[in-house]
Every structure is written in structure tokens, then in C-alpha cells.
Image (cartoon, rainbow, N blue to C red):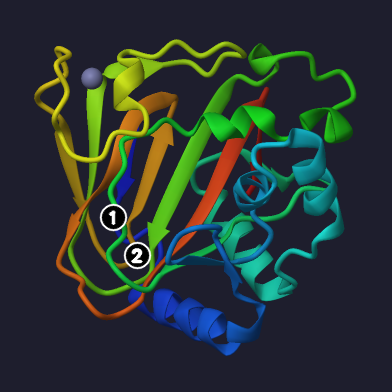
Amino acid sequence: MIKVYKNFLSEIECHKLMAFVNENIDAWKDYPDSNIKVYGNSYFRHLLETGFDESAAGKLYSETAGIDSEEYRELLLSKFSALYKEVSFIDGFSIPGFQIVEQETPRVWHYDDEKLRYPYKTAFSDYDNSRYFDRWITFTIMLSDGDFQYDYYSETESVYSEHPEYYCRKHHGLIGDSCNCDLKEYATIKYSVGDMIHADGRYLHRVGQSSYTNDKRITIQGHIVTKGSVAYMYW
Ligand SMILES: [Zn+2]
């Protein structure tokens, strides 16, 4: 289920976090082959950088420092405690980080299947497969001012599994809407500063249209897996 939490962060919190990201401009890293930058240790970035070589990406991930701010960690824990009984970070994994987009970037339909490639076994020795966790969530919190949209096909809702099934294989990686499959009407969610998109489960989705043009679009990006009563955050 996809849900929007309006004003999950206050405007003041968002402005403070934007200032924090801008103060640390020297620590921003490029996403390979794009105009996207990240601040924090993103496993997905390492996957892209290493041509989806999981062990090389895992090595980089474990050797790269994440965001070192006690205040930011505390803020995440306290905000998510309103949604989950117990919230924790995963030992050895990095905490949710920031994505900085400096220009409009192609809006690509995709699933967040990269989550399955994280080295969960290093933190959970009895991890065997995707059914180990009860829920798989990806969230985006908008920090920038503007009107933003998120598009998804509700009929593609599925669970994360080791061998993902695609509603339409051609749609994963598609730019634009031209496809001869039966996916026609997608749903659009609107969100703005402080709002969080919380996607529980697997969906074909993309970044939707926005009113922002020249300003940087900054978001907090992260994942959550739950096991029993504990929600584990990571990126
Ligand atoms: Zn299609």
C-alpha cells in the first residue's frame, strides 16, 4: 500500500535539513551517468558504480562512511517512532541519506528491486531469503519547496521475492508511456515540502511531474524492513 504522510517533517525541520545538506557539499557524491548527487552512503549508488557487481558494491558499502550526525539520527528515530512500535538502524548498514537533483532527470518506470541485493546476511546471520522480513518499505521525504508528483500502477502491487515477476517486463526501465501492454491508467500522488511517500510492497512507479525548475530538489531516501515488532531503517 502506498500512503502519503502530510507534514511528516515540519517546514522548519526541512529547512534545517536542507542547510545541513548544503553545508556538506564537499561530501556529495555523483550517481554514475546522471545529474543526481547523493549525500550519505547509498548502496544503490555503489551497485551502479560497480556494474551491479554485488560483492564489489558490498565491499565499497562497508568501507564508505555514512552520515555522521547524532541529531539527524535522533530525528529519524523519533519521527518514525510515531509509525512503528520499535525503530532501529541495521548494524553496519548506512542510515537514510539525501538525494540531490540539480536538473530535471528522465522519469523512468521501475521497481526498487535493488533492495534485495543488500548484504543482509552480514547483519542477520540467519537471513535466508526475502521472506525473512515481514514488510519491505521504501520512503521518500520531500525537503524542497514545490509541487511534486509520484506515479504508480496500483495493479502491479506485489511482494519482493528473489526472482521478481514483472507485470510487464518492458515497463521496467521505460521512459514515457508508450507500451503495448494493458497498463494504461496510472495513479498520481501529489506531495510537497515535509510530506513523505511511504510505499509498502513492490510497485511499478516513477517520479512524476513537478513545478520545480532551477532549484535543487532534495529528498531523504531510505528503506525499512520489519521483523516482528522491529522496523529497521537503512539506505
Ligand atoms: Zn508495458
Residue 213 position in % (x across, y down)? 20, 74
Find numbered disc 2 in the image and state the secondary structure of the residue it sits on: loop
Mark earlier in primary sequence (1, 2): 1
To which residue does mark 2 refer?
Answer: 194
Q: Quadrant of residue 209?
A: bottom left
Residue 37 position in % (x across, y down)? 51, 68
Residue 59 position in % (x across, y down)? 85, 47
Q: Which residue is at the front of the view, 129 or 230?
A: 129
Q: Which residue is at the front of the view, 113 or 144?
A: 113
The residue positioned 26% from the left and 74% from the top of the image is 145
Where residue 6 is drawn, which disc sits there? 1
Q: Is residue 137 visible?
A: yes
Q: Residues within 10 Å of mark 1 (few under 14, many from 20)?
A: some
Q: Which residue is at the front of the view, 125 or 103?
A: 103
Residue 181 position in % (x across, y down)? 17, 14
Check if mark 1's residue and mark 2's residue have beta carbons within 8 Å. yes
Q: How many marks?
A: 2
The answer to whether 40 appears left or right of 64 in the picture is left
The residue positioned 87% from the left and 18% from the top of the image is 126
Q: Is residue 63 above or below residue 15?
A: above
Q: Amino acid at mark 1?
A: Lys
Q: CA distance from mark 1 to mark 2?
A: 7 Å
On the rendered image, what quadrant is the N terminus found in? top left
Where residue 31 is drawn, which disc sits there? none
Q: Amino acid at mark 2?
A: Gly
Q: Quadrant of residue 110?
A: top left
